Image (cartoon, helix red, strand yellow):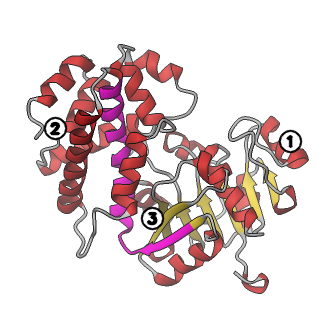
Amino acid sequence: MTPENRAKCAVLGYGSWATAIVKTLTTNRQHVDWLVLNDDIRESLIQRGRNPTYLPWCDIDNEYITPSADINEVVRSADVVFLAMPSAFFTKFLEPLTEPLKGKIVVSAVKGIIPGDYLTIVEHVHRYYDVDMKDICVVTGPSHAEEVGQCRLSYLTVASADNTTATTVEGLLANDFFRCSLSHDVLGVEAAAIMKNVYALAVGIAVGLHYGDNFLAVLIAGCANEMNRFLGESVPIEGRNINAAAYMGDLLVTCYSPLSRNRRLGTLLGKGCSVKSALNEMTMVAEGYYAAECIRRSSMRRNIEMPIADMVWEVLYNNASARDAMLALTKILK
């Protein structure tokens, strides 16, 4: 964007992904009003341009940021509001909000489902904050925050029902290391981003149980087929290419990368940790834990066969043995 038509940006959230998004925006010389509820993190950002807890090595030009603990102050003058908090804390973050989101562009960078609500972020924002679907955007794709924070080449998808909204958000984010493509499949890419976390848990369980690369390849191929079947029946849209980065790319990086927190949670379960102890060992939220319950409910309601997602649910919520559940799955995979 040129200086005369820059949008005013707000970012809600101060974890790894929020920090990476702010890094991207400020690299593009975009000023950001930033909701940071933690006093120590906020002071460090103001004084040193660093988040000492999340991506502490990532330098942010503090000339371009205004960190605040007041969500209404952050949102009030924004044209574009980026949502980048863990889905488990989404409603808590927005609870004090009295400023309207209606009339602003709202960008979800949350790859998760709201626990207990069983609504995606897009659905929740549309229903409870009266934001028109044409003003809602999803940013997704294979994008570990650690790599974006290092300005390493990443390919993201910006999805919106409205071309103007999508191109506005693309103009804010796109640069030499943050490449963007556009999509109209808002609900599809959002669902894929939720599902890939469940499948990364499945792969992590297999890794923890010492299954080899040959099996992992078959397992991930099965995950892709299962995702494609679910999207086709629950969020149908003409012309969807499941092999695109927003679907297959995000699935692959989350399943294969050691940076994946969902794969790490699955690995702990595969090694014999209880669900409670594995969750306690995680330093960041693994979105797949909450997503597994939602996908289970959705697939049962629509009578969609999803044996891999079901296996993850059995381990997480039905006290199934990870070893026994994976062994049963190996007998039906092809």
Marks 3 and 1, how far apart at CA: 33 Å
Give the magenta-colored segment's residue range. Answer: 179-207
Q: Is residue 319 left or right of residue 155?
A: left
Whether residue 204 appears in magenta in the rendering, the answer is yes
- Residue 307's tag is 2
- Residue 77 screen position, x and y as percent: 74, 69
Task: Tell me which residue sits at (20%, 45%) in the image.
Answer: 222
User: In the rendered structure, which amino acid carries the disc numbered 2?
Assistant: Pro
Q: State the image quarter where residue 190 is shown.
A: bottom left
Looking at the image, is 136 positioned above or below residue 317? below
Q: Position of residue 237 (x, y in %)?
A: 24, 71
Q: Which mark is nearer the camera, 2 or 1? A: 2
Cα distance in 3D space between marks 2 and 3? 31 Å
Q: Nearer the viewer, residue 50 or 73?
A: 50
Q: Nearer the viewer, residue 211 or 127?
A: 211
Residue 249: x and y in percent read: 39, 56
User: In the picture shown, does residue 120 fall above or below 182?
Assistant: above
Magenta region's main secondary structure?
helix
Q: Which residue is under mark 1? A: 43
Q: Nearer the viewer, mark 2 or mark 3?
A: 2
